[in-house]
Structures are given as C-alpha cells and as structure tokens.
Image (cartoon, grey):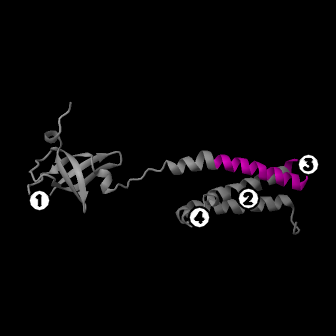
C-alpha cells in the first residue's frame, strides 16, 4: 500500500497513536470539553480503538499467514471488544466515581455545626460544619434572635446570601 508494507503502516499508526495518547494525557481536560456532548466520541476510547487495531493488525501480519483483509477484520473485532471492555469497566466507573468538593448553600440546611465565634443577639458569629468533604466554616446569625455561646452545637435552619441562620441544637430539640 503506497509502497509500504502493511506491517510498517500498522507500526507507524501505532507509534502515532501512542504519541497522541501521551498528548491526550497532558491535555485531557481540554479534549474532554470538546467532545462533551457525544459520549461515544470520547478521545480515550477512539485512541485506544485505533491503537489496539494497529497493534493487533501488526501482530497478525507479522506472526500469522492470514490474508491482510482477514487480519485487519480480526484486529478490528479484537479492538472493538477490548475497547468496549475498557469503556464500560474502566472509564464509566472512573467518571461516576468522581468526588466533588463543591457544596451548595441549600445542601447545608438541616446539618449540625459547632460555634467557633460566639453569635450575638443582633450580629454575626462563625460556625464550622464537618462533612465528608472536610471542614467548612461559615458566617452565622441566630435564627431566633438569641445569643449563642462558643462551642455550642447548632442546627442550620437556612442559608441566605452566605450567612447560615442557626438555632441551638441541644436546647431546641429533645432526643426521645
């Protein structure tokens, strides 16, 4: 083909795809943003499919006596199977396992916190909320207009404009 042997073409494609894969590793965030809307045009899947096809074609051409078209078809079938396994058993679980450290004000409502700066009757103090994402500190005001001392456990009633409105947790609720 074009004066080159098929093994040379397969090997060249494999080397080029390996180089593209290395570039993809460096610029993955940019490449993922480009193909965001189409899940099957994932660059990792496309690069792996072409790489596996080239590697399979090279090995089949080099070490078997199959005809070139049969070797190519077998390489495509092997690449499709391995790429599907890679996609469904590695890439999909990795993407769904991403942990986000982002929280919303609404997600804080109903959680308990601890006062680290006392909350005056008509002013602001500060609370800390311990979650699986870490410790979040937030400006706080009393929901019922009462003074809340240091080290009091509080319940976040609502969050407006970055301020958590809290009430004393121990005083306001009984455990039955």
Comparing labels 1 and 3, the label whose residue is closer to the camera: 1
Between residues 149 and 8, which one lies in front from this camera angle? Answer: 149
List x then y, in percent, for residue 60: 83, 50
Drawn side of residue 10 relative to residue 176, left or right:
right
Task: Check disc 3 and report the residue beneath it.
Answer: 65
User: Which structural element holds mark 4?
Assistant: loop
Tell me residue 176's x, y (percent).
Answer: 21, 30
Q: At 8% from the left edge and 51% from the top edge, which residue is drawn?
A: 147
Q: Which mark is residue 162?
A: none
Which residue, given by chain and number where applicable, does mark 1 sit on? 123
Can you identify the residue that label 4 sits on?
Answer: 35
In three-dimensional space, the C-alpha distance between marks 2 and 3, rounded to whole angstroms, equals 21 Å
Q: Mark 4 or 2 closer to N-term?
A: 2
Residue at disc 1, secondary structure = loop
Secondary structure beneath dot 3 equals loop
For the stretch drawn in magenta, the main secondary structure is helix
Work out whether mark 1 precedes mark 3 in sequence or the reverse, and give the earlier one: 3
Which residue is found at the position 51% from the left and 49% from the top?
A: 96
Q: CA distance from mark 1 to mark 3?
A: 84 Å
Give the spatial CA distance, label 4 vs label 1.
49 Å
Q: Is residue 78 left or right of residue 97?
A: right
Give the number of the disc on residue 14: 2
Most extreme residue toward the bottom is: 2
Identify the mark nearer the N-term, 2 or 3.
2
Q: Residue 84 magenta-drawn? A: yes
Mark 2 → mark 1, Cα distance in angstroms: 66 Å
**Foreground: disc 2 or disc 1:** 1
Density class for disc 3 (Cα within 10 Å; few <14, some 14-19, many ≥20) is few
Which region is colored magenta?
A: 61-86
Q: Quadrant of the N terminus?
A: bottom right
């Amino acid at each position: 083909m074009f004066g080159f042997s098929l093994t040379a073409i397969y090997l060249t494609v494999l080397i080029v795809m390996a180089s593209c894969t290395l570039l993809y590793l460096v610029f993955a965030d940019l490449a993922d943003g480009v193909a965001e809307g189409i899940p099957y045009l994932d660059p990792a899947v496309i690069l792996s499919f072409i790489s596996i096809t080239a590697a399979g074609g090279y090995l089949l051409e080099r070490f078997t006596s199959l005809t070139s078209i049969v070797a190519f078809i077998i390489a495509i079938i092997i690449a499709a199977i391995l790429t599907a396994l890679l996609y469904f058993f590695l890439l999909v679980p990795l993407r769904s396992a991403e942990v986000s450290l982002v929280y919303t004000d609404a997600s804080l409502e109903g959680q308990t916190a601890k006062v680290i700066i006392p909350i005056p009757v008509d002013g602001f103090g500060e609370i800390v909320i311990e979650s699986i994402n870490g410790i979040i500190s937030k400006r706080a005001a009393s929901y019922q207009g009462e003074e809340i001392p240091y080290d009091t456990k509080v319940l976040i009633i609502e969050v407006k404009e970055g301020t958590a409105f809290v009430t004393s947790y121990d005083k306001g609720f009984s455990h039955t």
